[in-house]
Amino acid sequence: MAIHIRSQEAEAAQRFFEASRNVDRAFRALRAEIRDDDVAPLAYGAAQSRLDHALDELARAEALFDSVTEVQARHIKDHRDH
């Protein structure tokens, strides 16, 4: 059972890591669009949308990671109590 839980933790951590990286990339792309003197409204809007999507995914990944680690912590506590 513990191997399965660790696997879930690893998958949740990987998802959170990837989501964090996507936020970084999206933020850098948006910042590049802002610095561009000839920024087109569509390009800026697309970059903003990409950042919004990346932030949403990061929030979902964080919630998943928190949920998985909370379950793991409860499981460990239950085993110690018995």
Image (cartoon, rainbow, N blue to C red):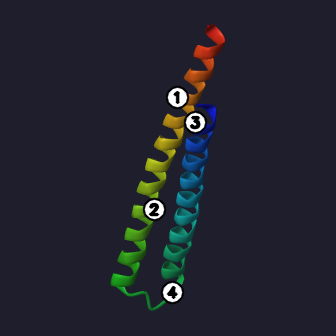
Amino acid at dot 1 = Val
> What is the crowding at mark 3: few (fewer than 14 residues within 10 Å), some, or many (at least 20)?
some
Q: Position of residue 37 (x, y in %)?
A: 49, 89
Upstream in the sequence, badge 3 or badge 4? 3
Q: Which residue is mark 4?
A: 36
Name the front one of labels 3 and 1.
3
In the figure, residue 76 lies in which quadrant?
top right
**Residue named by callout 2:** 54
> Measured along the vertical axis of the image, is residue 52 above or below residue 42?
above
What's the amino acid at mark 2?
A: Ala
Q: CA distance from mark 3 to mark 1?
A: 9 Å
Secondary structure of the residue carrying numbered label 2: helix
Q: In the rendered view of the protein, which quadrant contains the N terminus? A: top right
Q: Is residue 71 above or below residue 61?
A: above
Instruction: State which tag comes first along the sequence, 1 or 4.
Output: 4
The residue identified by callout 3 is 5
- Left-right relation of 78 to 50: right
Q: Farthest residue to the bottom: give it.
A: 38
Of 70 and 82, nearer the camera is: 82
SS assignment at label 4: loop
